[in-house]
Structures are given as C-alpha cells and as structure tokens.
C-alpha cells in the first residue's frame, strides 16, 4: 500500500514528477540536436543519419520512463479522478514561465493516456486545447542567444552585413572564400530589392540556430523592406578540401516550402524556445500548417497533437463525408479521404492476394523504416494513429462496406461515449498528405495532349527513383500508381509495403536463354531468389506508352541496367553518402566538388 497523503500534496508530487520527466526529455533532445553542428564540422555524415534515426525514439522512451516512475512511486494508475483533476491544475502552474509549454502539455497528454488507458479524444484530464500561450516567450538570461538576430545594412554596407551574419553563425571550420560567398549571396539578394527604394526599416533577420540535415547546414531568415518580406535560406556545404562554401541562395515561400517539405527528413536545430522558431518560420511560409513545422524540427509528437486539433476543428466546420479514395485500389492498403481535407487515411487490410507475401507486422515495419529514414524529398511522411473515432454519419455506406469487407478487424461501430452518437472507431490507421496519383496525372496529360507535362512527369519520376536509390531505398513496386505529384510538381513515393534497402537487394541481369524453348517460353526459366531484382524487366510494366518510353529512355535508361543499381549498392555499402539537393542544381553558385 502507498502511504496516505493529502490529495493536493500527492497531486503536486505527480505533476512535478511529470514535469521532471518532460524536462529530461527536452534536455536530451536538445543536446542531441546541438551535437549536429560538431558532426557537420567533422563531416560525420553516417553519424548524422544515425543520430536523426535515434532521436525519433527519444520521446517514447521518456514517456515510458515517466509512466513507470509514476506508477512505482505514486500508484498513479490507482488514483481517483479528483486527484487527476488536481494534477492537471498543478501542472498548469508549473508551465508558467516555462520555455516549452506546448511540448510539456503534449508530454502530459501522452503520459496521462498511458496511465488512464483512455483514448485521446475521450480523456477529460488532458490538454485538448493549450492552457498556456506560447506568444512572445523569450529567454531572459543575459548569456542566452535571441531567437533571431537583426542586421541593418545601408547601401554601402550590405556585403559587410551579409559577411557578419555568416560569421555570427559560429561555425568552427573555415570557409573556402567567405568574401566571395558573401558577394554571391548579396548579388542573389539584390534581385529582390535592388529595383526598389530602401525603406527606413530595411533589415535582414536571421534565425540564430542553424538547420542541420544530412550533409548541409542551412541559414534561414528574411529580408524586410517597407511592407515587403522575402524569405531566404542559404545552404552551407563542405568542398573536397574540407572547407565551407555557401552553395546556393533560395528565396521566396515556394523555395522554402520545398526545403521544409513533408517528404524530407527532419532538421536538427538547437532551440531553447521551439514555438518562437515555429512563429518565425510561419512568417516565411504562412500556408504551411504549424503541425508540419514541428514535424520538420523533429518534434513529431507535437506535430501530431496539432494535426489532430486541426482535424477536429475541420470536422466541426465541414459537412462532407468520408469516401473511398479515387484511383486504383491497393492490394495491401484500404485508402479513404474527406474531399475537403487535404489528407488521406490508410488502413492495412486483413488479407492480401497470393502475390503479396506479407503480414500486418511486416507492413508496419516498412512504415517505421520510412519514418526513421532520410526521405530525401521523395517519400511522404505519415502520421500513425490508434483508436481513432469518427462520427458514423460522416461515412458513406460504400466506405463502411469496404472496410467491413477488407479490414473488419480494424473496425468498430458503437456508441462508446453512451451519448447516443454512433462512432466509427478505427483500431489503427496512417494519415498522409493527399497527392494526385501519378497514373491519373499522366492520363490527364495524355487526354489534354500536353507533351510538356508528360515529359516533366516522366523525368521527375526517374529523378525520384534515383534520389531514393541515393538514400539506399529500393521502392519495390515502381508502378506509376504508387507515386504522387505535389503542388510544386515534385514526384513522391507513398506505397511502402515492398520497399527494401538497396544494400539488401541482389541486382542481376536476366540470363540468356539456354535454348529456343527458353526463348519462346512465357515462364521464367532461370532461378530467382528472394532478394533478386532484374531491372531490365521493369520496362514492360512501366513503358507501354510510346511517348513515355521515348522520354524515359532518353533521360533514365540507366534505371533498366543492373550495373547502375549494383554500383550504387557497392558505394553505399562502402560508407559513401550521396548528395541529394533540396533545390535544383542550376541554383548552385559554383561547380565546386563536394565532400
């Protein structure tokens, strides 16, 4: 038995232990993020990738630790509800003057729902809405860095100010030629303000923390002149001599949306006040939801919380119904959407046709692999939810019948709250941003006779596969229907049930027929082992249309050659990390060789 205490004293002790658990989590998260600069400076690319994967696990580990402590020390799983009501009130008090209150609220939700074993949307003792504002939080300590720095150049000091903000980044590796790079950056900047009068408020605002991902460090800021604000990002890379170079200058919301795409790996940024970074980034990309900024910064659980709040808000202000998603139905996933909401919902089916030798656990493992991997702008991020409830009257009967037929184990229809409202409860689902399937996009281009659109799509499709190969990913099923196109015209892969690491595959040429019978046979006459891949056999499935075939063979014929795949496999296995740029190569300043 646990000693009897006054409820208020016990509630405060539980709240304080939960806050200690969160503070430990964010301290470890921030320390790992801060180490990214050292890995960048020492060109430890494999270490950078490993740290990004491992950091994803931090949150769940800290939640588990906190749950175990609360149960062991306070018998938290056996406390009455009035104690939990007080726990939340004490916890809110601990959030006053906290630098990460929104993250701490989400941590409270995660721990509480684990202990009380209630679904997120039913629990009366969590933060359904934020209790503490994140507006204007700033670290008041004298030694603390501000969230962003301001620079006020005049017509005669512009290059000096660009030079100064590059020097203020605090990188401990010398630039190849910092004066040259500052001049190149200023030249690119001037195209956005040189034709207008400089106003009294003319300035550069630059976030204090660098954004590290893969082999790059990114400076993020904006130019302000009068009522005009121009976002910018400057990628800094290493050349083969181990010195730094500013590789390009990206300007405007569209450039930054691609850099912060939902199809890319997270950044590592040393942030004392994450909400201040999100607020600054939203001023650069106002169309992007706050949830996706938290995701991009590696704070996926906060992104998930905000996504769910946005979803509930959308449900309250819309009346359309969930339906079976347009397009060719998948053999493994049942996909549905709400036409007015820009995401799709994916449920793993209970059974699969014979050619799909897989299990639910294996499929979930593939999605976890993608979550932990560098997505190089070519694999859509997914949010994973369990026990999600929807109003039954928002589902078409056809969709309910589809789920009952193909995924009955994942469906429950009941009045769970006892209030007379029938709910559809999905045991497990993935949610990802909606894109136009590439087969539909291509068909629309054929119907319109849009040769330029067809060429762009086919070239982008091949580029997407090559970027995936560079990231050590073999898509498995490369049919057009498994890829989508974003609003920026980028091709993104989103069907993960057959992906493999390139380094786990054995790429082979089709053996020559042994005789005339082999040559005329409709059956495979050669031995095929589990991980064997024959790239030359891709053509008949992908290139039936002569226009598509012509464009593909002109730009990506090497994808049908086993030697291309095998050479990439060997280099990756030897520890090489390929360069995959989140911007077009013609945006680069110099043709310098990269480390």
Image: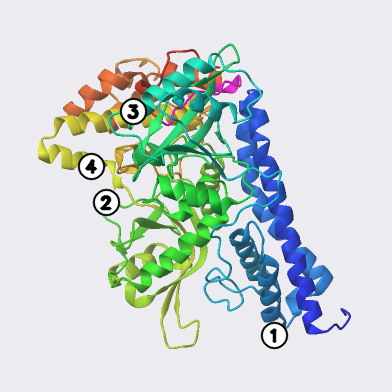
Q: How many marks?
A: 4
Residue 259, quarter of the rendered image: top left
Cα–Cα gap, marks 3 and 1: 59 Å
Q: Earlier in the sequence, mark 3 or mark 2?
A: 2
Quadrant of the image occupied by residue 225:
top left
**Dot 2: element:** loop
Q: Report the residue marked by disc 1.
A: 82
- For this rendering, which residue is in front, 573 or 195? 195
**Nearest-to-viewer mark from 3 and 2:** 3
Marks 3/2: CA distance?
21 Å
**Magenta stretch: helix, strand or loop mostly:** loop
Numbered mark located on residue 462 in the image:
3
**In the image, which disc is placed on residue 441?**
4
Q: Nearer the viewer, mark 4 or mark 2?
A: 4
Instruction: Tell me the quarter of the image containing the C terminus.
Output: top right
Give whichever of 233, 462 is nearer the camera: 233
**Residue 268 in the figure: left or right of residue 580:** right
**Residue to which mark 2 is pinned:** 327
Q: Cα distance, mark 4 to mark 1? A: 56 Å
| 574 to 88, vertically: above or below | above
């Amino acid at each position: 038995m646990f000693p009897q205490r006054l409820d208020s004293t016990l509630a405060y002790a539980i709240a304080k232990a939960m806050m200690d658990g969160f503070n430990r989590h964010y301290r470890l998260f921030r320390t790992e993020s801060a180490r990214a600069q050292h890995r960048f400076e020492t060109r430890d690319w494999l270490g950078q990738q490993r740290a990004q994967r491992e950091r994803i696990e931090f949150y769940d580990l800290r939640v588990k630790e906190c749950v175990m402590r609360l149960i062991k020390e306070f018998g938290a799983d056996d406390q009455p509800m009035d104690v939990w009501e007080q726990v939340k009130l004490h916890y809110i008090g601990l959030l006053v003057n906290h630098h990460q209150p929104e993250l701490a609220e989400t941590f409270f939700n995660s721990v509480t729902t684990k202990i009380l074993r209630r679904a997120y949307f039913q629990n009366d003792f969590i933060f359904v809405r934020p209790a503490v504002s994140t507006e204007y939080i700033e670290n008041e300590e004298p030694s603390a860095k501000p969230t962003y720095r301001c620079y006020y150049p005049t017509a005669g000091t512009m290059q000096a100010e660009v030079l100064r903000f590059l020097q203020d980044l605090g990188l401990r590796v010398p630039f190849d030629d910092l004066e040259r790079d500052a001049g190149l950056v200023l030249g690119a900047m001037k195209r956005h303000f040189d034709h207008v009068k400089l106003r009294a408020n003319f300035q550069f605002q630059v976030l204090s923390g660098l954004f590290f991902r893969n082999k790059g460090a990114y400076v993020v800021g904006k130019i302000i002149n009068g009522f005009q604000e121009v976002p910018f990002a400057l990628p800094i890379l290493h050349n083969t001599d181990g010195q730094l170079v500013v590789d390009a200058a990206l300007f405007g919301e569209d450039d930054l949306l691609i850099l912060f795409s939902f199809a890319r790996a997270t950044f590592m940024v040393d942030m004392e006040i994450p909400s201040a970074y999100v607020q600054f980034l939203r001023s650069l990309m106002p169309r992007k939801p706050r949830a996706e900024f938290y995701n991009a910064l590696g704070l996926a659980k906060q992104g998930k919380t905000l996504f769910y709040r946005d979803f509930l808000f959308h449900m309250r202000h819309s009346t359309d119904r969930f339906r079976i998603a347009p397009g060719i139905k998948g053999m493994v996933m049942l996909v549905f959407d709400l036409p007015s909401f820009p995401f799709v919902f994916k449920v793993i089916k209970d059974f699969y046709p014979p050619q799909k030798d897989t299990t639910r656990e294996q499929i979930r493992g593939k999605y976890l692999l993608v979550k932990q991997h560098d997505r190089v702008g070519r694999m859509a991020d997914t949010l994973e939810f369990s026990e999600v409830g929807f109003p039954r009257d928002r589902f078409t009967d056809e969709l309910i019948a589809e789920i009952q037929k193909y995924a009955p184990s994942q469906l429950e229809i009941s009045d769970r709250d006892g209030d007379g409202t029938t709910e559809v409860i999905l045991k497990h689902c993935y949610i990802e941003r909606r894109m136009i399937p590439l087969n539909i996009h291509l068909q629309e281009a054929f119907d319109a006779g849009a040769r330029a659109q067809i060429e762009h799509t086919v070239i982008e499709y091949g580029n997407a596969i090559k970027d995936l190969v560079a990231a050590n990913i073999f898509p498995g099923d490369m049919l057009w229907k498994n890829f989508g196109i974003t609003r920026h015209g980028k091709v993104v892969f989103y069907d993960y049930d057959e992906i493999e690491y390139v380094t786990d595959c054995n790429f082979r040429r089709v053996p020559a027929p042994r005789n005339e019978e082999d040559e005329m046979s409709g059956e495979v006459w050669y031995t095929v082992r589990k991980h064997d891949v024959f790239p030359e056999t891709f053509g008949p499935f992908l290139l039936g249309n002569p226009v598509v075939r012509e464009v593909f063979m002109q730009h990506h014929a090497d994808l049908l050659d086993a030697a291309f795949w095998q050479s990439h496999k060997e280099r990756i296995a030897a520890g090489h990390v390929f360069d995959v740029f989140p911007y077009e190569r013609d945006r680069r300043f110099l043709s310098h060789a990269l480390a």
